[in-house]
Image (tube, rainbow, N blue to C red):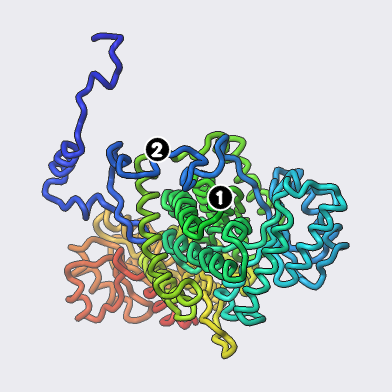
């Protein structure tokens, strides 16, 4: 062998067709598309492999970080981001103390959520920022009113403290159309709200380091929209603001420069990376169409927040794993600042422990995984580049569809956006009910011993919608995939009794063990006590054991071939003293039903509906 010859030159090139021929041969007649092409949550068809030649048709593949349309990001030296923690402000002195403490623990971005807008004035803002250097970190404010007064107070503080306004990175979040979508109404008319926004943009433009407009997509993702849909709706929202502000005499450059976007980051790891890359590309093209004086106006500034759709009350430490992969998606997608919500945020107020973990999750990605060292670390990956292009194409198609309806506001008033998000949420919940989509610890592999009733805030956990005659539009209601499962299990806990599900294991060893494990997991989802068994020599022995422990549900676990006789015998022996269930979907199902057996569970069962039926039978509401 010639040692000077390059390694890959020793192997002949393999064409895509040769790969396809080999794959089809190995499939032995099975359909390639059905077996190996998978679909994302938004319906994008993803191939099992991509090659260099796939990048040749992508115009953005040869761009560098910082190149228009910024698909590879706006940063050229590294991938550093701001680590954000939000603080609810009810006492300005206490909030300042917490902010200073958080800054000493690795936080580089503060989010102040001001509970009482009427409390905003020069004195309280000075108190809140005491000891904080705004030019060294990112500072964000959320206030439901008096945003003008807040910006004026901030400008005054910067002057008095001698801070260079060009060195600060401050956002005062205003999103009136997002608030309309969330609440169904505003405290003023939409036109008045947009007039106020115009004044806010003009005022904040006097200070280069202050932004005041934050189109947010997290409402859409937290209500059930997939990555592509969230992107399209958020771009449409941003474009609506461009239209409204330019109509009010504000230049496209000033309007675009006043914006910082927020996106939710969900569990779809690679699609979420692609979403942020596609977002920058599409937004740059949208802004370009408005004719700004500089191409810099098209730079999209992105904040990402871990989404709540997939977060759970039960087995809540799994939420840490969820937020960790979500934070990685945001980092690799190029978010400029990230909020990792504490693992318990969906069901109670976070404590010191959960806030510390949330901070450290990002610090691990930065200081130990070094994901901040390389600009656009996903660049050149055939898969990510192709997924970015597909996401951009589909989001653009949906964006154009909304624009053809008259834009975001018109589509919202027609109910188009609400209906599509509602349909997407229903599909996802149906998948969770059948465990096609798994929420670990909730609809699959629950902790049998866990109880939650005393630990959660019910108002925080479940969002109930009551229509109001004052609504201008139907609001977009946030939800979680675990909602119905958690209501089911909490109903069991609060009933004052914990039903016992007894595994009557008999016959074929392998099948009875597999079905007992499946059934134990199935009934534990509803919070039932589960009693598994090694196996019984006879039906009589098994039924007697179940009666001794006062079982509420008896599940026979055996093989399909044995059910024809054993299930009938067990059903007769139980004689209605407990609910009888057959684990599986045996060929003799019709015969068993004719004999009076009503209940069967299998991998095809709708777990949620089936358990709701058992709860009703057992008198649990």
Residue 108 at x, y percent in the picture: 70, 46
Residue 256 left/right relative to 352: left
In the image: residue 154, left or right of residue 418: right
Asked if labels 2 and 1 touch by Cβ distance under 8 angstroms, the answer is no
* Total numbered circles: 2
Picture quadrant of residue 24: top left
**In-front residue for pair 87/185:** 185
> In terms of depth relative to the viewer, which is nearer, 175 or 269?
175
Q: Quadrant of residue 118?
A: bottom right
Q: Please give the name of the residue rendered at 40% of the width and 77% of the height, measured from the top-left corner.
A: 614
* First-in-chain label (1 vs 2): 2
Q: Quadrant of residue 547?
A: bottom left
- Numbered badge on residue 62: 2
Q: Which residue is mark 1?
A: 294
- Frontmost residue, 440 versus 215: 215
Q: Residues within 10 Å of mark 1 (few under 14, many from 20)?
A: few
In x, y percent, where is residue 90? 79, 66
Residue plotted at (57% across, 67% down)? 246
Labelled disc at residue 236: none
Looking at the rendered structure, the secondary structure element under dot 1 is loop
The residue furthest bottom is: 469
Task: State the separation of the CA atoms marked 1 and 2.
Answer: 22 Å
Q: Image quadrant for the N terminus?
A: top left
**Would residue 561 be seen by someone viewing this image from the given angle?**
yes
């Amino acid at each position: 062998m010639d040692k000077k010859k390059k390694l890959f030159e020793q192997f002949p090139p393999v064409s895509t067709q040769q790969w396809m021929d080999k794959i089809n041969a190995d499939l032995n007649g099975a359909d390639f598309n059905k077996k190996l092409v998978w679909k994302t949550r938004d319906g994008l068809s993803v191939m099992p492999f991509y090659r260099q030649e796939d990048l040749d048709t992508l115009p953005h593949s040869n761009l560098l970080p910082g190149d228009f349309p910024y698909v590879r990001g706006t940063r050229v030296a590294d991938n550093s981001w701001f680590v954000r923690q939000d603080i609810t402000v009810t006492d300005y002195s206490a909030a300042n103390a917490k902010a200073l403490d958080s800054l000493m623990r690795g936080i580089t971005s503060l989010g102040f959520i001001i509970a009482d807008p009427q409390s905003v004035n020069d004195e309280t803002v000075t108190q809140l920022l005491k000891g904080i250097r705004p030019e060294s970190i990112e500072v964000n404010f959320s206030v439901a009113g008096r945003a003008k007064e807040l910006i004026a107070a901030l400008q005054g503080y910067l002057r008095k403290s001698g801070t260079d306004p060009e060195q600060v990175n401050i956002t005062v979040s205003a999103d009136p159309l997002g608030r309309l979508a969330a609440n169904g109404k505003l405290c003023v008319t939409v036109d008045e709200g947009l007039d106020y926004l115009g004044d806010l943009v003009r005022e904040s433009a006097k200070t280069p380091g202050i932004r005041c407009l934050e189109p947010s997509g997290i409402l859409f993702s937290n209500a059930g929209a997939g990555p592509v849909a969230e992107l399209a709706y958020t771009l449409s929202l941003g474009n609506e603001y461009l239209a409204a502000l330019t109509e009010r005499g504000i230049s496209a450059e000033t309007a675009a420069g006043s914006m910082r976007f927020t996106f939710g980051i969900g569990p779809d790891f690679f699609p979420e990376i692609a979403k942020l890359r596609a977002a920058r590309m599409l937004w740059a093209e949208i802004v370009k169409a408005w004719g700004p004086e500089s191409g810099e106006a098209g730079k999209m500034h992105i904040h990402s927040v871990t989404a709540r759709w997939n977060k759970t009350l039960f087995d809540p430490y799994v939420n840490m794993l969820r937020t960790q992969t979500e934070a990685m998606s945001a980092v690799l997608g190029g978010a400029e600042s990230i909020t990792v919500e504490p693992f318990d945020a969906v069901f109670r107020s976070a404590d010191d422990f959960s806030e510390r973990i949330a901070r450290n999750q990002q610090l691990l990605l930065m200081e130990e995984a070094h994901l901040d060292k390389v600009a656009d670390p996903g660049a050149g990956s055939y898969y990510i580049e192709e997924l970015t292009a597909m996401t951009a194409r589909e989001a653009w198609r949906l964006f154009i569809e909304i624009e053809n309806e008259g834009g975001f506001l018109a589509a919202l008033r027609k109910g188009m956006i609400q209906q599509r998000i509602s349909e997407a949420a229903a599909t996802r919940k149906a998948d969770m009910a059948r465990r096609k989509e798994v929420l670990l610890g909730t609809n699959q592999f629950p902790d049998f011993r866990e109880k939650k009733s005393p630990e959660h805030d019910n108002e925080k956990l479940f969002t109930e919608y009551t229509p109001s005659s004052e609504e201008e539009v139907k609001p977009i209601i946030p939800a979680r995939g675990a909602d119905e499962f958690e209501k089911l299990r909490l109903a069991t806990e609060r009933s004052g009794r914990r039903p016992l599900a007894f595994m009557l294991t008999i016959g074929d060893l392998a099948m009875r063990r597999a079905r007992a494990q499946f059934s134990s997991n199935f009934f534990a989802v509803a919070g039932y006590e589960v009693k598994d068994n090694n196996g019984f020599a006879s039906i009589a022995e098994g039924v007697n054991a179940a009666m001794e422990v006062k079982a509420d549900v008896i599940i026979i676990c055996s093989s399909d071939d044995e059910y024809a006789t054993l299930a009938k015998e067990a059903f007769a022996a139980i004689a209605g003293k407990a609910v009888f269930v057959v684990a599986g979907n045996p060929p003799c199902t019709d015969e068993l039903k004719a004999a009076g057996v009503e209940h069967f569970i299998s991998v095809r069962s709708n777990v949620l509906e089936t358990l709701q039926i058992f709860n009703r039978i057992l008198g649990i509401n």
